[in-house]
Image (cartoon, helix red, strand yellow):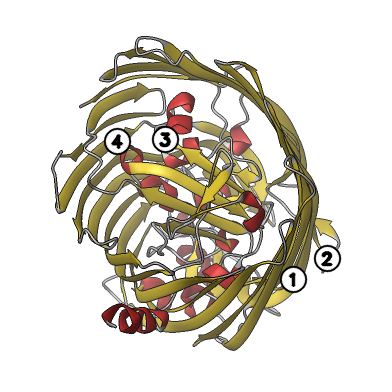
Amino acid sequence: MKKVWLTALLSLFPAVAGAEVYTLPGVVVTAENRKETKDTVFLPHETLTEKDMERMGASNVVEALSTALGVDLSSGSQDSRTVMGSNQLMIRGMNSSQTLVLVDGHRLADEDTASSQNMNLLQRFDLSQVEQIDIIRGADGVSYGSSAMGGVVNIRTKKPGSGESSAGFRLGEGENTLYFHEDAKGKGPFYLAVSGRVTRVRPLSFWRDSFSRSIHYDGFDVPSYGIRRYAGLDGLYDFRNGSTLRLKADYFDEDTSMRFSDASMDASGIHVVLQQDEKSRTERTQWNTSLTYEGKTAGNVYSGEVYYSRLKKYSETWNGRPDFKDQIHSPYVLPALTSLTSRLDNLFKARDYDRAFYEIWGISGKDTITRGSHRLTFGSEWNRSTYTGTRLSRETYSGTGNKGEDGHGQTNGASYVSDTWHVNSRLTFLPSVRLERDSSFGFLGVPAAGLSYRFNDRMTWKTSYGKGFRAPSISERYIHLDHMGVTVDGNPDLKAETSRSFDTGLEWKDGKTAWTISWFDQKVKNLIDYEEMAGSAMEYRYVNRKQAELKGLEGEISYALLPRWTVRGTYTYLDGRDRSENTRLPNRSRHTAMLSLSYDSKAPYGLSGMIWSAFKKDFYFDDRNYTWNEVNLSLQKHWGEKFTASFGLYNLLDKKIDALYIHGRSWFAGMEMKW
């Protein structure tokens, strides 16, 4: 009777997000740890295992995701300063802010503008603690809620109790890393794991010679470099009755610097230096904690979770430009010049700083019941996000240069239900719906449906239709940004961005060969963007003004050449357009292809590795198309089960594109010990 009441109680909690999926030969394992056939997983998905990441020689999550189908991690944007040292995270061409990043199924506090969300988040994880990364391509607003318009990246960490510990180091042209993960062996019922990581990112410089808003940038950009630290504590109690309680806490901090190219402009015959020898320093600290209970009975699988995440950021910028009064001197029209120099002093400050504090806390729960040919999953979630900082305030204390601070919050609550219905031995149908209320936009209903038909043991056809949405962030509603020549104001009346996604395709697997091909069409409404304010130069306000359509074709094929060799190829064609202006969406590649050859001797003292070629054609950036190819090599030498040495070369062809922060050939080498 207690189990029945517990199941009913957990069903009232929010669901962190449907069943996260990852593939194994012939089966899919969901977050409820239930094995099911591939026919019941409808949205295109991919899983990167610990072994996959090892073969690539990946040192961080960005490198681990670099070969994933449909994922674009390019650097740069129309204003590259906003993402210097970072990477966009686009799935099927949807914006980075429209991709949801989860850790063990829950959200983390992060910066919340379109040019900052998810840009630095992927740098904050200890890869030695990551068991696998699940990637879902396509809108899944029903299961995951806001921001899952383009897809989901769920980073799943190792649960304590495996008894596997490791320590190692990696040296490279881009960064040096030292790490450990200690999971002591024991018979239970309590297990404890501790992990730590220190990374020093090296400075790399890129030449910039471009014009933006009549400003000429001329010099070297040096993206973020400095030190990053991570520490984690993970405890699990096994009740020995099919249920567990897990308490996880981790800490991250970084201290990084950037340097910027010089900038100037010519107006009315006057040459004005806007920035010179400019540099900045940023400190970020993040705490994440979660308490998760999971259990199962003969007919139920249920879970509940409470989580909290906070991010503190402080950044400071120094500009060594000459004083504008000394640059602009004329005996005529003195009042106008006084106004101009005052305006320039405000936009291109000799010193500026920003302080921000983000928090998110929430509770979630779900329950899956299997009855006959139906598997019913239902649950709900509640979370609250807050942001306090200088960019939400218009107040500046005269004479001191100090800024005021203001804060805002928004609350979200939702419930959803889905039914995986095995109509017969070949046909499976999945209807689902989510009801959500957000304090920023009100009430929203989100439907979705999937259909799978298995022609035979080798071929399956799948199609899905889903809605996605993204709530306007606190910054988009309330920010007042006056920095680097641009003023941006928030808009409290913004509507939620919404999308509808349609996907259909075939899957085939027969012996050594497996392939998939699918076509997708995504339409987005109420895209949040800037609009220049009437009568004001370089002053903008957030508005819902754009509509976009992203459609394309993607395919993947893998073939086992020999027991130790595997070849894999992927291809994506993407046509992304801003329908409100009938123009191409920037920072996207029209053609993306990847070809890899993997080797695993499967011997205790053997070799493993991978060589792969990543090709991009017509990457649209800053009104120009770029085409390039990168060839990468990674090798591992094993000495039994304890020691592994790794070596690799990225960008073997030494391709360099300063505008996209592609640096050229780089190397890495490392050693890992397991016990």
Q: Residue 546 has which mark?
A: 1
At label 4, the amino acid type is Thr
Callout 2: SS: loop
Q: Residue 50 has which mark?
A: 3
Q: CA distance from mark 1 to mark 2?
A: 7 Å
Q: Residue 199 has which mark?
A: 4
Image marks 1 and 2: residues in contact by CB distance under 8 Å:
yes
Image marks 4 and 2: residues in contact by CB distance under 8 Å:
no
CA neighbours of label 1 inside 10 A, class few (<14), some (14 to 19), many (20+): some
Of callouts 2 and 3, the N-terminal one: 3
Task: List the residue tagged with mark 2.
Answer: 579
Q: CA distance from mark 4 to mark 3?
A: 20 Å
Which sits in the foreground, 542 or 401? Answer: 542
Q: CA distance from mark 2 to mark 3?
A: 41 Å
Q: Residue at x 54, y 58 (%)?
A: 115
Residue 199, compared with residue 484, is above or below; it is above
